[in-house]
Image: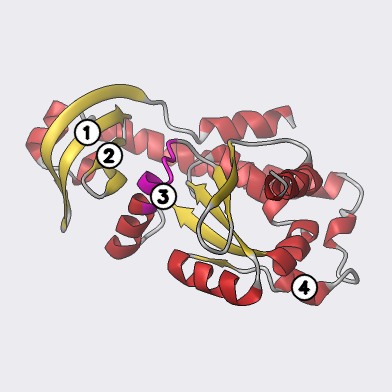
Amino acid sequence: MRNLIALALSLVPLVVCADEKIPLLKTGSVTYTNVMVTSVTATDVYFTHAGGMGNAKLKNLSPDLQTHFKFDPAKAKEIEAKQAENKAAYHNQLVHQSDAHPPDMTRDSSAKPAAATAAVWREDYPGALKQAQSENKMVLLDFTGSDWCGWCMKFDADVLSTGKFKDYAGQKLELVKVDFPHHTPQSPDQARANAALGAQCHVDGYPTFILLNAYGKELGRQVGYQAGGPEAFIAELEGFTRR
C-alpha cells in the first residue's frame, strides 16, 4: 500500500504558483482571454480565464510564452515519460494487489448485477439534471484529472469501480464526470464546458465530488481522497441528503 501511495502521488505535477495576469493566451485553435496564471509546472501552465479554469501544454504555446515560462523541452519530455511510466506501474500494482487479497464481495456478480451496470458516467451535465428530475435521483459530479491525478485514480479503483458503489449509484444517482485530462484527447467544447462548470462550482482541486439535488442545488461535497472504501463514501453521500 505504501508503494501504491508513493506512485499515486508521483503522478501529481509539482506546482509553482505564479498569480500573473495575461490578457491573451492561445494554444492551438483555442484562445483564452483575461487569463490569470495560477501555477506553472515543467510541462503545463494552469490558469483561470473569462470562461472558467483551464490548462495548456507549454510545448503548444508560442515561442515567446515558452521563453517567459522557462520551458525546457528536454526536461518536459523526461517528466512526461516518467508520468506515463508511473501511471503504468500504479495500475500494475493495483492489479497485483487485488490478487493478493481475499475476493471483494462487493463485486460479486450474484448481487444485483442489473442495478450495478445501470450506473453510467456521462459528461452531459444538463442532460444528467433532466434525467435526475424524471427519475427522482440526485446528481454526483466527479471533478477529476483522470490520466494524471494519482489520488483520482486511486479513489476510482477503491470506490467508484466497486460493485457496491455501482449498485448504490444505479438506484439513486446520475453520474457526471467532469474531466481535466493532460494526455487524453478532449474536444474544445467539452473542455470549455468542464472549465465553466468547475468555475461555477468553485472547484480548485482534484478529486472533488459534489452531490446535487435534481435541480442543481448543492447538498455537500468531498474534496480529495477519503479512505474507507465504498461504505464510507456512500455513508457520506447519505449524510449530505439529511442536512
Spot occupied by residue 167 in the image (x, y as percentages of width and height): 77, 65
Tell me if 68 is positioned left or right of 153 in this view.
Answer: left
Going from N to C along the chain, the mark reached first, 1 or 2, is 1
Q: Quadrant of residue 189?
A: bottom left
Residue matched to label 4: 115
Whether residue 13 is visible, yes or no, is yes
Going from N to C along the chain, the mark reached first, 3 or 4, is 4
Tell me if 156 is positioned left or right of 85 in this view.
Answer: right
Considering depth in this image, is 84 or 217 the residue closer to the camera? 217
Of the two numbered discs 3 and 4 in the rendering, the one whose residue sits closer to the viewer:
4
Going from N to C along the chain, the mark reached first, 4 or 2, is 2
Spot occupied by residue 13 in the image (x, y as percentages of width and height): 43, 32
Judged from this view, the residue extending furthest toward the front is 243
Q: Which disc number belongs to residue 48?
A: 2
Considering depth in this image, is 35 or 219 the residue closer to the camera? 219
Going from N to C along the chain, the mark reached first, 3 or 1, is 1
| Type of amino acid under label 2 | Thr
Q: Secondary structure at mark 3?
A: loop
Q: CA distance from mark 1 to mark 2?
A: 5 Å
Residue matched to label 3: 180
Q: Which disc number belongs to residue 36?
A: 1
Q: CA distance from mark 4 to mark 2?
A: 39 Å
Going from N to C along the chain, the mark reached first, 2 or 3, is 2
Of the two numbered discs 2 and 3 in the rendering, the one whose residue sits closer to the viewer:
2
Q: Are marks 1 and 2 in contact (CB under 8 Å)?
A: yes
Spot occupied by residue 210 in the image (x, y as percentages of width and height): 56, 48
Pointer 4: residues within 10 angstroms few (<14), some, or many (20+)? some
Pointer 1: residues within 10 angstroms few (<14), some, or many (20+)? many
Whether residue 182 is visible, yes or no, is no
